Image (cartoon, rainbow, N blue to C red):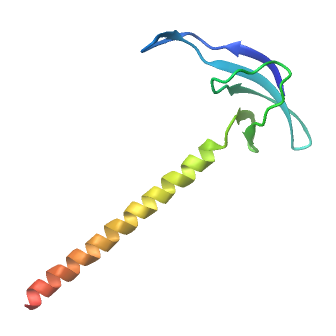
Amino acid sequence: MIDQIRAGTPYENQTGVSWDDYAHVHFQAQGGTAHALVLLDGRTYHAGQVITVYYSPHNLRYAQLSPSAKSSFTLDWGMILLFGLFGVVFLVAAVINLLSARIS
């Protein structure tokens, strides 16, 4: 649940001055109540609103609105494995081509 919303430090971007909004939230975790500061995603939120937060069981003060950190980590490793597999396939094809050229 959102306890309070606050604006972050202003910064300049391409469209002028902007800032990020943060929410002080509390949630139930590991048999107790945890508190965290969550970066909001641009939609309108209000104090008292119930939202879903994703948190690290090792650090309850770190929470976010989406589970993107784990998903992007999995996606990164998936892409590394995929391109690594392509590299191995092309390497094997090159070795076969080289050996067949020497035999001929």
Quadrant assignment for the N terminus: top right
**Residue 36: quarter of image:** top right
User: Which residue lies most toward the right here?
Assistant: 31
Q: Nearer the viewer, residue 76 or 48?
A: 48
**Residue 89: quarter of image:** bottom left
Q: Nearer the viewer, residue 12 or 42?
A: 42
| Residue drawn at 56 percent across, 54 percent down | 74
Q: In the figure, is residue 11 to the left or right of 40?
A: left
Total labels: the figure holds 0
User: Which residue lies most toward the front here?
Assistant: 44
Q: In the figure, is residue 36 to the left or right of 66?
A: right
Q: In the figure, is residue 9 to the left or right of 88?
A: right
Q: Position of residue 57 (x, y in %)?
A: 76, 45
Q: Position of residue 44 (x, y in %)?
A: 71, 20
| Residue drawn at 58 percent across, 14 percent down | 19
Quadrant assignment for the C terminus: bottom left
Rendered view: 39 above or below 103: above
Q: Position of residue 16 (x, y in %)?
A: 46, 9
Rendered view: 99 above or below 50: below
Rendered view: 77 above or below 41: below
Q: Nearer the viewer, residue 2 or 73?
A: 2
Rendered view: 14 above or below 52: above
| Residue drawn at 69 percent across, 34 percent down | 65
**Residue 63: quarter of image:** top right
